[in-house]
Amino acid sequence: MNNPGKFVTDSGPNGLNGVLGSTTAIEPIDPTINVTGRVAGYPLATTTGATAITGTGATLSGTIHDNGNATTTSFDYGTSATLAGSSSINAAPATVSAGTGNTVVTATPAGLNPSTTYYYRSKGLNSSGTTSGNILNFTTSAAAPVITLVTNSVTAPFSTTYGTASGSKSFVLSGTNLTAGVLITPPTTGFEVSTDNVNFSPTVTVGGAGNFGPVPVYIRITANAPATAAPITGNIQLSSAGVTTPPTITLPANTVITKAPLTITVNNQTKIYGAPIPTLTASYSGFVNGDTPASLTTPPILATTATTASAVAGSPYAITASGVVSSNYAITYVPGNLTVSAAPLTITANNQTKVYGAALPILTASYTGFVNGDTQASLTTAPTLTTTATTASSVSGSPYAITATGAVNTNYTISYVPGNLSITTAPLTITANNQTKAYGAALPALTASYTGFVNGDTQASLTTLPTLTTTATAASSVAGSPYAITASGAVSANYTISYVPGSLTITAAPLTITASNQTKLYGAALPALTASYTGFVNGDTQASLITAPTLTTTATATSAVAGSPYSITASGAVSANYTISYVPGSLTVTAAPLTITADNKTKAYGAALPILTASYTGFVNGDTQA
């Protein structure tokens, strides 16, 4: 390996530069082989964080790898970030033997300055050269902080009344080597502190990091501090980070807060005779610090000699207050009065309703305001109830006044509220009368009947008579029957009119189907059978039938004249609009023509006569001369 500065790679089991495993490095000089058989080289150095930092010292840490050579360990440290002009201190262990590998080394410099930032690095030295680790830093702790009580004027007792701040007392502080200001906390929440004797708060902080003073601090009892049954004791607390033995300031003996005066005056009340006792209330004079009656430990008990039934004659009745408990107030009471006044009574004529033509209802009244179990029977004179309506009063004049008057009772102031008698329309039912007509006949006259007329009224009393209509016409079919007959449009101010529809029933018209008479020759085919119709209306014809009639006869093509005439019948016709009857016809069979012609004969003179024969023309149905 006589190649200084060349890039060397090795992945053998012994590694390069004494480092096991796959290793890559830049060889600054020609490496040498040490007694372990490994390539030796510069040491490796890594700096790690400082620990055990105090105001004058710290423990420096790092890792040194011998890299195959015995290596001497140390640390450089100083206040320069580049370690210019730094000091050096031996590390422990001082030497790392060849082949040891990574070794943690430490050093503890002493005599450092408080609150100072120091920079340091680890360093290894062997036969190949010196290697320095990365530079780290730490800051030493500050010097021990101290709070000094310069003077203390908090010696005489504090004294005040609840709701009024006491006069202030003061003490003077100074501080050195502080990391933060001094927090001053009174012994209880009833005190407050200030640095200017003007602006007070529950706590105050004086000074800050470093030194301060002397600074005066003022303390007093707050205006909202509760009254005390015993003297207040305790110490004013002084605290600042790192101060372990702050001065002690003790409250003077016999520091007290006395109760404030509070006057509770019962409010005068008024109630109506028979009404419940009103809520008794009081007003307060002397609350401080935003206190209200809710601030009292026990609120006052308010009582009166009056009851719900107390008479006006005994009025006014006393109202007294008592029983208040409060640690902050000295209580005095002023009584009040409850005055009872007459009760109002309202007599209201009850509204009534009657149907047009009905008798007047019984007039009644309702009462609002009776107390103490009183009823209308308690009145010296009951009210008189009258109305302007009569049995025959019309709906159009409605409502009619109902008035109450004349009631007397010395315990009530009576007022009246009139009522109304409303006349409602009488029910009138107009029923369309049912009707019947035959299919095709003219519509009958439509009529109606009436139920509900009173006071001698008739349909002539209606302002407007009802209109009667039907959905049927002269041509309406039986199939749609019955057809509605409706009444509408009747008008009368005295009646609520309802309608009941009727119905128009269409009955089937009579229809006679007569089989037409027919004639045929014996042996001729049957003629077409036909019928005639009597009773069609509305322009109907046999084509209007749902099913045409079937015409049949007992005769056949071979029927003999002797059996003639033969019956022709019609059946099976269907129509919803007609009631169908049938009249049969007849088929007459007449004799067919037959011609018998004597056959011509010839014989010789003297010969016997020939047999005489004939020929026939006209036989039918297979007939012959036989």
Image (cartoon, helix red, strand yellow):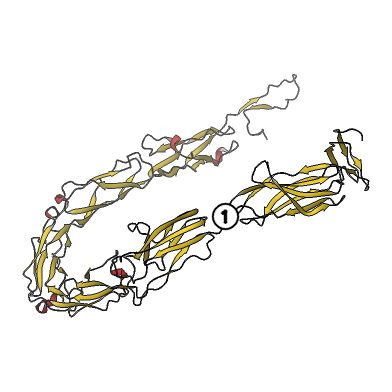
Is any part of residue 373 visible from this angle?
A: no
Q: Amino acid under label 1? A: Ala
Q: Residue furthest top?
A: 605
Residue occupying the point 24% across, 72% down: 261
- List x then y, in percent, for residue 356: 16, 58
Residue occupying the point 17% across, 61% down: 354
Q: Nearer the viewer, residue 407 or 187?
A: 187
Is any part of residue 496 visible from this angle?
A: yes
Q: Nearer the viewer, residue 269 or 576?
A: 269
Viewed as shown, does residue 215 lie left or right of 122?
A: left
Viewed as shown, does residue 535 lie left or right of 99?
A: left
- Mark 1 crowdedness (10 Å alpha carbons): few <14, some 14-19, many ≥20: some
Find disc 1 in the rendering and name its residue: 142
- Where's the N terminus, which quadrant? top right
Q: Quadrant of residue 55?
A: bottom right
Residue occupying the point 63% across, 57% down: 54
Residue 334, above or below 72: below
- List x then y, in percent, for residue 39: 90, 42
- List x then y, in percent, for residue 249: 43, 68
Q: Nearer the viewer, residue 339 or 567?
A: 339
Viewed as shown, does residue 57 lie left or right of 491?
A: right
Residue 435, above or below 146: above
- List x then y, in percent, for residue 533: 42, 37
Q: Quadrant of residue 297?
A: bottom left
Q: Residue furthest left?
A: 406
- Where's the C terminus, which quadrant? top right
Q: Secondary structure at mark 1?
A: loop
Number of numbered discs on residues: 1
